[in-house]
Image: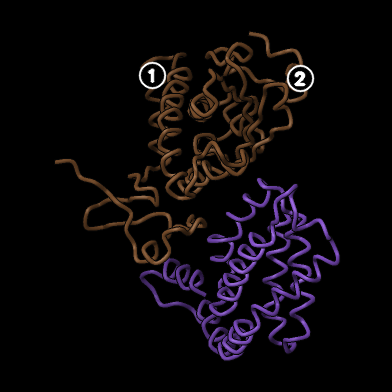
Chain colours: A brown, B purple
Amino acid sequence: MPLTLTHDTASKRANPQKHNHYGLRDFFQFDASRGSIVDWNDSQNILVTEDFIIGLIQGLQEEVGDASGATMYTIGCEWGQRDAFFFEKWFEKEFGRPARQSNLLFLLETWWWPFTAQGWGRWEVDMGDRKQGFMFINLFDSAVARTLGDIGNPLCHLYAGLFAGFFTEMVKKQLSCIEIQCYSMGETYCKFLIGGQERIDASPSGSTRALQPATLKNGCARGIPK
Amino acid sequence: MLSQMQRLSAEAEGRYATDEELRFLAEYLSSYELRLQTYQKLQQMEAGLLQKAYEKLVAQEPGMFRSGATDLTTKWKRDTVRILRFSVTALLINDLDSHQEKMLLWFQSIARAVNVQKSCNLTYTALQEIIRPHLTEPQANLFLPILEMNRRTLANL
């Protein structure tokens, strides 16, 4: 019989509609007797060390070589698409209205808060180029990049896939995402560009090349070359 | 206070805490009466403070409570009361870290998303001005910095 995990704390029972529930002990319910960590949205969480992230990336590199970036991106896409469905459910439960009827930036902040609480980093969404069909995301403290440090290559393929998958599902249009600067290239934060798949090349060679933001801004006007 | 207790518990694990590490407890205990008095005074004054802040802001920035055809007054009052109560709790238990973690960082991102940073700036400036005359100097020294932290965080300054 499958085990159903539910976040059920005295604090949540007293105030189930609380939106600012992202403090450590609010968001996570740690159950030592069952060995489980369940978050506010009834999703099971696990804790992993930086060694796990290093092992995952290096292991994948050994197994599939240059395709490891594309593999991580694909995993991220799948995750993002599934998470979009999950998000729509919990958003509606928490706010009592469909996600698609909400202010877009509010919606995005609300989507990302669980990720922030889980240690995936804080973000900043830049919609300045939305009319051109592009959107930028600045990510501070990428769990992947901060683990591996400055190695001279963009590393956050998992995040790029996550953003591509989530936004594809939310806007019902095939989108791609490319990391254009990365903490692992000596930058202070990671930056992602999201746009139509026909205009952004998220293939391994595309996603591992370093693009300069200034070049990119110019590129946005005419479309990023494949 | 609770954050400091947690830190102490982690840092002094397996040994006795030093006098220096225990100092915050003595400081908290000596300030507890003052904190409680201030907490109770602010609790009693809440509705009046909010109304005064609202009137001041309407006079100062008449368009602040409207967005197109939508009246934002109820929403502003709900958000301000919520943050005020978290602030007063932070004062009582002397835990600004928890206040940041549990309320301000979340609300900062929402304020940015719905573009009310200017409104937050004006609100927490007004609240400081309105509250100051009602508190003694030691009370004000405890509470006004929390309102200022709210202002700077939520207005992203």
In percent of the image, x 78 and y 18: which residue is there? Answer: A218
**Which amino acid, mark 1?**
Glu
Image coords of residue B48 (percent x, y):
69, 80
Disc 2 crowd, CA 10 A, few/some/many (<14, 14-19, 20+):
few
In percent of the image, x 74 and y 86: which residue is there? Answer: B134
Disc 1 crowd, CA 10 A, few/some/many (<14, 14-19, 20+):
few
* Residue that sits furthest to the top in the current view: A226
Residue B118 disc label: none
Q: Are marks 1 and 2 on the same chain?
A: yes
The residue wearing badge 2 is: A215
Q: Is residue B30 left or right of residue B72?
A: left
Image mark 2: chain: A
Which quadrant does the C terminus of chain A fall into? Answer: top right
Q: Is residue A155 visible?
A: no
Residue nearest the observer in this picture, B111 or A137:
B111
Residue nearest the observer in this picture, B151 or A183:
B151
Within the image, what quadrant is residue A125 found in? Answer: top right
Image mark 1: chain: A
Mark 2: secondary structure: helix
Within the image, what quadrant is residue B60 found in? Answer: bottom right
Residue A62 disc label: 1
Image coords of residue B1 (percent x, y):
52, 75
Q: Earlier in the sequence, mark 1 or mark 2?
A: 1
Which quadrant does the N terminus of chain A fall into? Answer: top left
